[in-house]
Image (cartoon, rainbow, N blue to C red):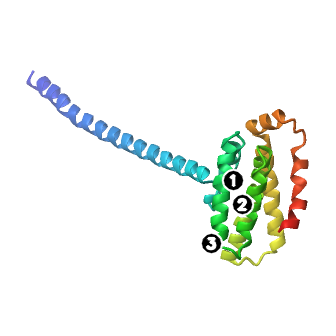
Amino acid sequence: MNENLRNALAFFKSAPQALQSTYDVSVKAVNQSIQMIGDAAKSIAEWIWGVLLGDFNDDQSTSQIVAGTAISMIPYVDQICDVRDIVACSLNLKNNPDSLEPKISLGLTLVGIIPTLGSFLKGCFKIVFSKLKRLMKARRIKKANADFYKLIEEQLDNCIIDIKKFHNDKDVQKFLKKHNIQEPYKLTKITNHAKKFF
């Protein structure tokens, strides 16, 4: 009987150690989960802030441009976004008067002044402009020896893909249907006329 009692006590003694180990693992897993959620929340907040900055954000991603365009197609919000972007472009032009980039940005913003449709066109052009701007920046940094025009052609092909994704977005489709725009790609041919201003 003494041996049975000893075995029973040994069983109950090891249980707290096992529970402590399980508790430690659980606490570590919860802490890691909290850290991951915090990191994800921080990334989401930074992305949203980049959208809200509009043209004050010089390095917007394509998704931020698309989200900003969708937001700026809302009546009245459109005008607020236009004022924000005009101020940003004007400050950028004042600080960099010899650079072509702020002039193009201001031109795109002026297209965006046209209610709703202008914001739509501005969004399409900003996608192209941001891709080309990144390409130019990479070219300056890396001093690539590759054929520059081939790189531009590849970037323009990528822009077309992004613009098609943008046009296929359900909110954009609602907008196009609401304003009876059957062929939005014909509207983007305005770029040939815009070259006169730059």
Given the image, on which type of amino acid does mark 3 rest? Answer: Asn
Given the image, on which type of amino acid does mark 1 rest? Answer: Thr
Whether pointer 1 and pointer 3 mark residues with C-beta atoms closer than 8 Å, the reply is no
Q: Nearer the viewer, residue 53 or 34?
A: 53
The residue that mark 3 highlights is: 95
The numbered mark, 2 or 3, whose residue comes first in the sequence reads 3
Q: In the visual, does 46 lie left or right of 108? A: left
Report the residue that reaches farthest toward the left.
2
At x 73%, y 76%, the residue is 144
Q: Position of residue 121 (x, y in %)?
A: 80, 50
Q: In the visual, does 77 lie left or right of 192? A: left
On the rendered image, what quadrant is the C terminus found in?
Answer: bottom right
Whether pointer 2 and pointer 1 mark residues with C-beta atoms closer than 8 Å, the reply is yes
Q: Secondary structure at mark 3?
A: helix
Residue 18 drawn above or below residue 194? above
The residue that mark 1 highlights is: 62
The residue that mark 2 highlights is: 130
The numbered mark, 2 or 1, whose residue comes first in the sequence reads 1
Cα separation, mark 2 vs mark 1, equals 8 Å
Q: Position of residue 4 (x, y in %)?
A: 14, 23
Q: Position of residue 9 (x, y in %)?
A: 14, 28
On the rendered image, what quadrant is the N terminus found in?
Answer: top left
Q: Position of residue 188 (x, y in %)?
A: 86, 52
User: How dense is the environment of label 3, judged by Cα within 10 Å: few (below 14), some, or many (20 and up)?
Assistant: few
Residue 109 drawn above or below residue 21? below
Residue 59 appears in view: no
User: How dense is the environment of label 1, judged by Cα within 10 Å: few (below 14), some, or many (20 and up)?
Assistant: some
Q: In the visual, does 158 lie left or right of 64? A: right
User: How dense is the environment of label 2, judged by Cα within 10 Å: few (below 14), some, or many (20 and up)?
Assistant: some
